[in-house]
Image (cartoon, rainbow, N blue to C red):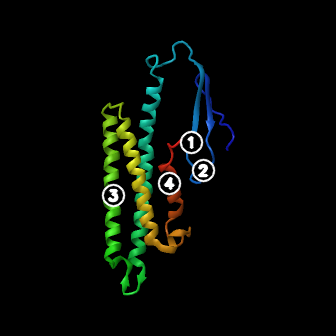
Amino acid sequence: MSPEPKASLPCRGLRLTQGPDLLAPRALGQLALDGVSLAPGTPRGAEGLGYVYAVQTIDAFRMSVDAAANDFARRALGPVTAHVVSRKVKGGMLAEMQLVQAALADMQVDLNAAEWLVAQVAWKWGRGARTASLGSASTKLLVTETAQQIFDRAMQLFGAVGDGYDPRRIDPSAVRYRASANARISEVS
């Protein structure tokens, strides 16, 4: 566990804790509310709606997790495509195999659908929808699962080369693979 952050918090009774050290670093922590009191004149919402505001904030930030997962997946497509085009196998090039072509097509279609879904949720949010929890949560589920499936396929197409980290040979896919998995499980606890 990392040391407690030294953030300046806006009120008494609010405590910020640092999350655990992760394989793929990202912001993760907890806000603890214990007898919170705000100074007079501090902007606040309607009394009793703190949980609603917290969930709306989570909804907004889910879009950044979704966008990152899509980016991880998009950045896996280029290297794996370059790999299958240049990889010689018995009887020709890996990219000439029908199953490889189908896998690449599936990866592209799945990623396009995930990107459109994120764009739709962001568009709704931008038009003022602040009660998009179901849409936001289901989008995060689909997008992060899709990214993981794309990485699984990419790692299969890379074969043994994709299981390591050699920036001279391939994009650092193993690092992105871990980051994608991290995004997928981020709301479990």
Earlier-in-chain disc, 4 versus 3: 3
Q: Is mark 2 on a helix, strand or loop?
A: loop
The alpha-carbon separation of the residues under discs 1 and 4 comes to 15 Å
Quarter containing the N terminus:
top right
At label 3, which amino acid type do we have?
Asp
Mark 1 or 4, which is nearer the eye?
4
The alpha-carbon separation of the residues under discs 4 and 3 comes to 17 Å
Earlier-in-chain disc, 3 versus 2: 2
The alpha-carbon separation of the residues under discs 3 and 1 comes to 28 Å
- Above or below, 128 against 183 in this view is above
Residue 116 falls left or right of residue 81: left
Earlier-in-chain disc, 3 versus 1: 1
Residue in the foreground of this view, choosing between 141 and 183: 141
The answer to whether marks 3 and 2 mark residues whose Cβ atoms lie closer than 8 Å is: no
Earlier-in-chain disc, 1 versus 4: 1
Please tell me which residue is depicted at 56% across the width and 43% down the height of the picture. 27
Please tell me which residue is depicted at 54% across the width and 60% down the height of the picture. 175
The answer to whether marks 1 and 2 mark residues whose Cβ atoms lie closer than 8 Å is: yes
Residue 47 falls left or right of residue 92: right
The alpha-carbon separation of the residues under discs 4 and 2 comes to 11 Å
The answer to whether marks 1 and 4 mark residues whose Cβ atoms lie closer than 8 Å is: no
**Where in the figure is residue 90, as x and y percent of width and height?**
40, 86
The alpha-carbon separation of the residues under discs 3 and 2 comes to 27 Å
Badge 4 density bin: few <14, some 14–19, many ≥20, Cα 10 Å: some
Q: Which mark is on residue 181?
A: 4
- Above or below, 147 against 90 in this view is above
Q: Which residue lies furthest to the top in this view?
A: 40
Name the residue tied to disc 1.
Answer: 28
Name the residue tied to disc 3.
Answer: 110
Q: Which mark is on residue 22?
A: 2
